[in-house]
Amino acid sequence: AKEGGRGQALAFAEEMEREVRERRELEADLREAFESDGLTIEFQPIVEARSGRVVSSEVLVRWQHPTRGEVVPDVFIPIAEHAGLILPMGMWVLKKACKVAAQWPDLETVAVNLSAVQFMDPNLVETVSDVLMETGFPGERLVLEITESVFLKDIGSASEKLDGLRDMGIKIALDDFGTGYSSLLYLRNYNFDKIKIDKSFVDEIGEQSEGLAIIAAIIALAHNLGLEVTAEGVERQFQVDALRTLGCDTLQGYYFGRPDPNPMLIGEIRNEDWN
Ligand code: C2E
Ligand code: CA
Ligand code: CA
Ligand code: CA
């Protein structure tokens, strides 16, 4: 048993070493990709539940690795944070998004994600302001999506930052709502404009009535606080029907459209039989 234990420990150490090496490699490749314009962005439509009209679009960053194929943001965003790349990368995404959206007046707003590390940047408000100036994009048309993790890492200045951004007309969305530990507490303590109900709740619609009860309660709560509600990860017609009935404001998910490099395709979404 002793020998086996030692063998296992060795295998474990080798596995660790392999993971560290792979991570370091990915980090170098990501730096190279970012510096040589190898990253792209895609747009996913956000639809007004009442009318079926596309009112907004979420920007999602993409990385096509030369040998590994597509690496998903859930993998490379943490790497970018670790490598100190997230700030320039995040601003690149924001600038690009503003430039594209500026030429696309039918779209009311464009939504850009901010990771906790980006939100912690003491220069965040100033940098975002610079991007708006440079691109001529109005703050009123920008939504910044943040998650609760922001408040775990940055207790002191979070409120000030939110206010600084909102002073520019920017709207703040609390992303992945309901997945953290204290979602309700954050709604009470900070100023948001909207919440995005996490896909895991939308997935529950139709499976159990509890699933619907929770979404109904979240929507009612948000509306009582004067917040707009977006449901994420909407894939099925019965989810659309239920969310419309509950008065959810906007809907996003594969049902309406997958993220796409060409934002103009979004204007072509048709919703016959909507009413
Ligand atoms: P998120 O902000 O919650 O984005 C929604 C994710 O759900 C996206 O995955 C989107 O492609 C996916 N999605 C949308 N509709 C559906 C649906 O109907 N079904 C399913 N199964 N998935 C759907 P993606 O693009 O892989 O992004 C994952 C996460 O990476 C994002 O989660 C966000 O946290 C982060 N991320 C993406 N782009 C950026 C960025 O530019 N900056 C930062 N900081 N984070 C980003
Ligand atoms: Ca998001
Ligand atoms: Ca989300
Ligand atoms: Ca997410």
Image (cartoon, grey):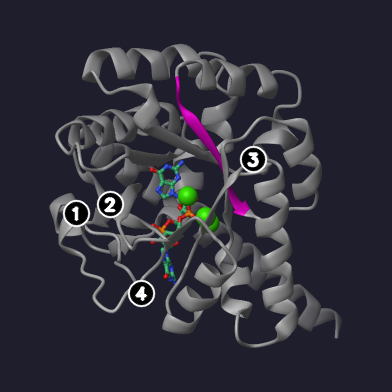
Label 2 to label 1, Cα distance in Å? Answer: 6 Å
**Quadrant of residue 155 in the image?**
top right
* Dot 1 or dot 4, earlier in sequence: 1
Magenta highlight on residue 1 = no
Label 1 to label 4, Cα distance in Å? Answer: 30 Å
- Alpha-carbon neighbours of circle 1 within 10 Å: few (<14), some, or many (≥20)? some
Q: Tell me the amino acid under the disc marked 2.
A: Phe
* Dot 1 or dot 3, earlier in sequence: 3
Label 4 to label 2, Cα distance in Å? Answer: 26 Å
* Residue that label 4 marks: 275
Q: Residue furthest front?
A: 275
Query: x%, y% of residue 6?
Result: 76, 73
Q: Is residue 226 above or below residue 13?
A: above
Tag 2–tag 1 contact (CB < 8 Å)? yes
* Dot 3 or dot 4, earlier in sequence: 3
* Residue that label 3 marks: 226
* Residue that label 1 marks: 261
State the SS at label 3.
Answer: loop
State the SS at label 1.
Answer: loop
Q: Tell me the amino acid under the disc marked 3.
A: Gly
Query: x%, y% of residue 61?
Result: 33, 47
